[in-house]
Image (cartoon, helix red, strand yellow):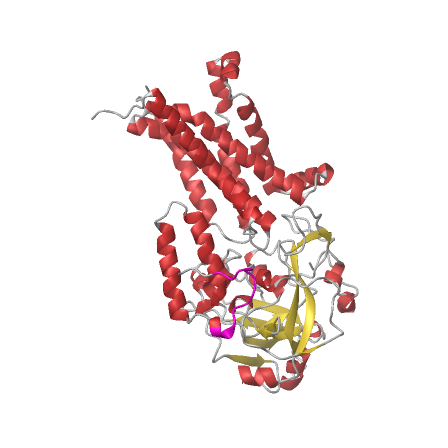
Amino acid sequence: MKMFNPSPQQFKAIKAALFVMALLPFARLVLFAFTERLGANPIEFITRNTGDWTLYFLCITLTVTPLRRVIKWNWLIKLRRMIGLFAFFYALLHFTTFLWFDHFFDVEEMLKDIAKRPFITVGFSAFLLLIPLALTSTNGMVKRLGGRRWQWLHRMIYVIAPLGILHFWWMKAGKHDFVEPILFGLVVAALLLLRVARVGSADRR
Amino acid sequence: MLIKRNPDGIDLPLASEITPREIFESRRTFIRQLAIGSIASGALLEMASREAFAQSPAAQKLGAKANSAYVVLDKTTPYKDAATYNNFYEFGTDKSDPARNAGTLKTRPWTVTIEGEVKKPMTLDLDSLLKLAPLEERIYRLRCVEGWSMVIPWIGYSLSELIKKVEPSGNAKYVEFISLADRKQMPGVRSPVLEWPYVEGLRIDEANHPLALLTLGMYGEILPNQNGAPVRIVLPWKYGFKSAKSIVKIRFTKDQPRTAWNIAAPQEYGFYSNVNPEVDHPRWSQASERRIGEDGFFAKKRKTLMFNGYKEVASLYTGMDLKKFF
């Protein structure tokens, strides 16, 4: 069977479509904000929604490599940066909601909150760790760091994703509502195990 | 057209406009299917859920005299917010679930059994409850343990009226409220998020405090199902979860009852759970709150008041360390 390999024009179109799709959750929030459809507690809605989408995009980012190997669409790798940056984009929105609407830029209060409450500590750490990845996502930075060091740095995603899940897990823990955190946990665990299995096997290419 | 919305999206349906349940249900199924088949499922499901608001068989008026002793200066929360943003785990854990799912709750016939350490145990149906004492409208602040608040005009009478009737014995030190837990009517009961049935409790002197309201209605009407129909308790000086909904049994006991949230997470939810800005929840501060339907995006959260502003209950707790008995 011949593998699908898009022409440069096709690839451009795919990438543009993906970009637009990745912006849809944000567009939905903006639309809902202006049409008063965010429910009784809009800030909670935005906080949860942007948190959810951060996790979705982290999972999608982690799916690119295994998927590429399975279906042999190597060109998928060229979309990974954009997906990863969207994970950062939604994490930034999530954090901004917390800083702005929850703490009104009272940084001292916010830092106290971060230090005092483990679930926030963990979420904040995950966000901080994402920043260097976003900053070094340009081609120039890859060159400057050198492929190896760059790759090493970006393996931080293997720490960030579980931290994100833990943050979500703890948030839900007090309410005994584990269905969603378990689903996310299983997805991330599977995606990470695939990598461990590969390192362990002789099948490395 | 299948999806009909009020132009202002807030008004209650007139009795004549209320859709019979079967038609409503089939319409919802249709919307669901439509939504699942569509890429824009998020937006459509949202519409489906908003439409579900119309399911409240509400608009059944409940006459009550305003009690001027219990009025707050705060603005009343819009009915739509109070009836669509609820924690009622028997109908799902998301705050939009109860409004969507509580249509299956059958509130008539309904009885409340009063038992335990009382001289006159009894089982009362809804009509006897409605007639037990004159109905009053009281506007109370409601502070949820999650850090948000509302202002709601409830209809009912002091729980003490009922307590008087059953004549508690000298052994009655606590009152336990037991909510309905019927898998058939309450989809959330199938999931083990809490120990069912939902149990709440008070010390007898707390239960006898005039503020403790046996509640049968809100906003001039009978309670919507999602707000704990047909009969619930409202304790404005405590976090919302203390106010048990859809009560089927009230038991007077010698020992402190084991309450639902306290069983689930004892380090987070104490037996007393009085609103207290100085005692943080382990995962967030309780010093401030967001008023639903009023505080916009750019409003700073408002300060939470001790006992939610109901200082008259303070004497119930003299000499108690409220940090320890949180």
Q: What's the residue at 69%, 39% (across, down)? A: A110
> Does the magenta portion include B8?
yes
Outermost left residue:
A1
- Residue A34 appears at what percent x and percent y? 57, 47
**Magenta segment:** B5-16
Position of residue B167 in the picture relative to residue A194 (left or right): right
- Residue A79 appears at what percent x and percent y? 41, 26
Q: Judge whether residue B290 can be spotted in this image.
A: yes
In the picture, residue B211 is in which quadrant?
Answer: bottom right
Position of residue A14 in the picture relative to residue B139 (left or right): left
Position of residue A93 in the picture relative to residue A6 (left or right): right
* Front residue of this view, candidates B52 and B211: B52
In the picture, residue B87 is in which quadrant?
Answer: bottom right
* Secondary structure mostly seen in the magenta stretch: loop
Q: What's the residue at 49%, 34% (across, down)? A: A161
| Rendered view: A86 above or below B54 | above
* Front residue of this view, candidates B14 and B85: B14
> Does the magenta portion include B29?
no
| Rendered view: B129 above or below A76 | below
In the picture, residue B204 is in which quadrant?
Answer: bottom right
Quadrant containing the N terminus of chain B in the rendered view: bottom left
